[in-house]
Amino acid sequence: MITIRRATSKDAEVIIDFQQKMAWETEQMTLVPEIVYKGVNAVFNDPTHGQYWVAEDKGNIVASLMITYEWSDWRNTNVWWFQSVYVLPEFRRTGIFRSMYLHIKNEAYKGGIAGLRLYVETNNSKAQHTYEALGMKSHHYKLYEWMNE
């Protein structure tokens, strides 16, 4: 049985490992271990950065994601952004992300959060289908960014 729970700092090592795996899998990027270590732990040390959630199967973490916050002056509340979603390959397409999403959606609803958002790579059609099956919609926004690399 899958258990969804808010992550604690004791989960940082697994989350760091997942971040490194995801970066390589999605962008063939090798993360600097010291930086991702500090980045993940910064979330646990300062909750204004976000919150991690994990899914466990028989006591083992099999998926994680991070929620970050966007203040909406139009709605006078936050929008939660899903980021850093990672599910171990052998647990993909088993409903784990769906369970995490529905759990977090319920938490957002209870907390008066305006909505949930995420961004996805344009060529990741499997993820896009998953999000659409959950009732999420791709609206009229395009993402633009500048990254100091």
Image (cartoon, rainbow, N blue to C red):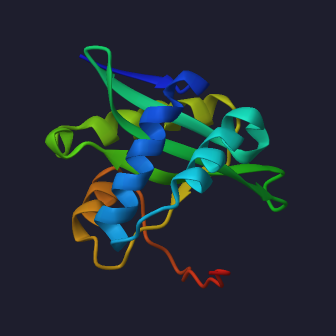
Q: Residue at x 23, y 38 (%)?
A: 95
Where 90 falls versus 143 (above or below)? above
Is residue 135 in view?
no
Q: Is residue 79 left or right of residue 54?
A: right
**Towards the viewer: 145 or 41:** 41
Residue 6 placement (x, y as % from top left): 54, 26
**Quarter of the image with the C terminus in it:** bottom right
61 sits left or right of 31 in the view:
left
Tell me where residue 2 appears, x and y as whole percent. 28, 21
Q: Residue at x 24, y 70 (%)?
A: 125
**In the picture shown, does residue 113 fall above or below 99?**
below
Q: Quadrant of residue 37?
A: top right
Q: Is residue 119 left or right of residue 86?
A: right
Locate the N terminus and report the quarter of the image it occupies.
top left
Residue 86 appears at what percent x and percent y?
A: 36, 48
Observer-nearest of 47 and 134: 47
- Residue sitting at 44 percent across and 31 percent down? 54
Up-down relation of residue 118 to residue 111 (above or below): below
The residue nearer to you, when weighing 41 against 109, is 41
Q: Is residue 18 visible?
A: yes
Of residues 139 and 120, which is closer to you in this image?
120
Position above or below: 50 against 74: above
Q: How many marks?
A: 0
Residue at position x 54%, y 58% in the image: 117
